[in-house]
Amino acid sequence: MTSTTMKAVRLNAVGDGLHVESIAAPVPAADESLVRVRAAAFNRRDVFITQGLYPGIEVPRTLGSDGAGTLPDGREVVIDPMLDWGDDSHVWSPKASILGMPRDGTFAQYVAVPSGNVYDKPAHLTMEEAAALPLAGLTAYRALVTRGEVRAGETVLVPGIGGGVQTFVLLFAKALGARTIVTSRSDAKLERARALGADVTINYAVNPDWHKALKRGEVDLVVDSSGGDTLNKAFGVVRPGGRIVIYGGTRLESTFRLFPLFWNHLDIRGTSMGSPADFQAMLELVNRHEIRPAVDRVYPMDQVAAAAERMAQSEQFGKIVLTID
Ligand SMILES: NC(=O)c1ccc[n+]([C@@H]2O[C@H](COP(=O)([O-])OP(=O)(O)OC[C@H]3O[C@@H](n4cnc5c(N)ncnc54)[C@H](OP(=O)(O)O)[C@@H]3O)[C@@H](O)[C@H]2O)c1
């Protein structure tokens, strides 16, 4: 590599997969910082983009929303991938976007980001663990705390615990003193969830009527991104006046009966990513409780295709990380 070129994971066309190429290194603007990325992490979004299932795709692009690395002065940092959230803490601005599309992202040796999006890396985390934190940690924090308003002693239902965001929902809920019920297709993932503190674990593949294993009204808060039949089933176990927070739709759609919704005064709230205040509060929580992200596997950058395939198959428990040498 010369001083002006770098290795980056590029998407050149939808359906063409991801390729490591040598491209020009970014030149930061006056209000931007240049981060030498040491580790990056996958989100479902990166897979959706390669499959053409995401709005506003522009190619060629360097993917990647999550990254941790060093500044030119040696400071170790994590990057908040939420760009241009805006002034309203309740909702992002029309200008808001996410690092890694349309702006070139973190699957590269260097990324230029607004200096306000750069935060000190939590000292107790390795670079790989820190890279696992930003997008999923931010989304989980806002879903559980800002929008979900979780309180100590409440019971939180976390469907599909293998998901990167859901592992953070579990970790944060336990740190904040909540009881947790998690579901997964996989007993091995449920075992790992128990090790992270999950109180009740249910295999939804073995037991499609998993909701019947729970007491009616047992759950105060549901945090979901799986869609499909999860909501309809969750309605049966949420207490009257309970909350359901949705940050994703892996199965794209959901069908549910309306009666339990209005009869029980349920509150459905949508959320996406989070504000700069959410990001700071998330980092404070992680630092205060020395929370360590659930890292599924770490791949070197040139094995990015294998990493993407593992996520496409939903084989992971937690975050899939890339090391960037
Ligand atoms: N709005 C936002 O800001 C935002 C931010 C991040 C993510 N998202 C969205 O949230 C979703 C999860 O993202 P992620 O990055 O955490 O992805 P991920 O790590 O791939 O999570 C997917 C998980 O969904 C679970 N799942 C799949 N089918 C399920 C079903 N039928 N019932 C219950 N769970 C099921 C699986 O868990 P098990 O294997 O344990 O069953 C799987 O591991 C995606 O749709 C993503 O686009 C949105």
Image (cartoon, rainbow, N blue to C red):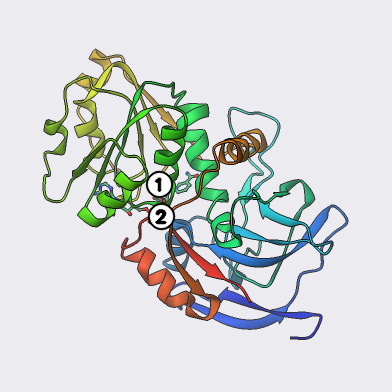
| Labels 1 & 2 near each other (Cβ < 8 A) | yes
Secondary element at image label 2:
loop
Point out residue 14 in the picture as x, y percentages from the top left corner. Answer: 47, 72
- At numbered mark 1, what does the secondary structure look like: helix, strand or loop? helix
Viewer-nearest residue: 42 or 254: 42
Q: Residues within 10 Å of mark 1 (few under 14, many from 20)?
A: many
Residue sitting at x 71%, y 49%: 120
- The numbered mark at residue 322 is none
Question: For the point 23% across and 13% down, which residue is it?
Answer: 263
| Category of crowding for the residue at label 2, using alpha-carbon neighbours closer than 10 angstroms: few (below 14), some (14–19), many (at least 20) | many
Q: Is residue 60 placed above or below 89 in the rendered structure?
A: below
- The label on residue 318 is 2
Tell me the distance, in whole angstroms, between the alpha carbons under discs 1 and 2. Answer: 6 Å
Left or right of 303 in this view: 121: right
Which residue bears the numbered disc 1? 167
Considering every residue shown, the one lying at the far right of the view is: 30
Q: Nearer the viewer, residue 153 or 236?
A: 153
Residue 285, percent from left and from top: 57, 35
Q: Would you say the beta carbon of the disc 1 residue lies within 8 angstroms of ligand 1?
A: yes
Quadrant position of the N terminus in the picture:
bottom right
Q: Work out which quarter of the rendered image holds the C terminus and state it.
A: bottom right
Mark 1: which amino acid?
Thr
Q: Choose top left, top right, bottom left or bottom right for residue 88.
A: top right
Q: Is mark 2 within 8 Å of ligand 1?
A: yes
- Judged left or right of residue 275, residue 272 is left
Tell whether 46 sits left or right of 223. right
* Horizontal and vertical percent position of residue 53: 42, 60
Left or right side of 221 for 92: right
Mark sitting earlier along the chain (1/2): 1
Amino acid type, mark 2: Gly
| Residue at (65% x, 37% y) in the render | 280
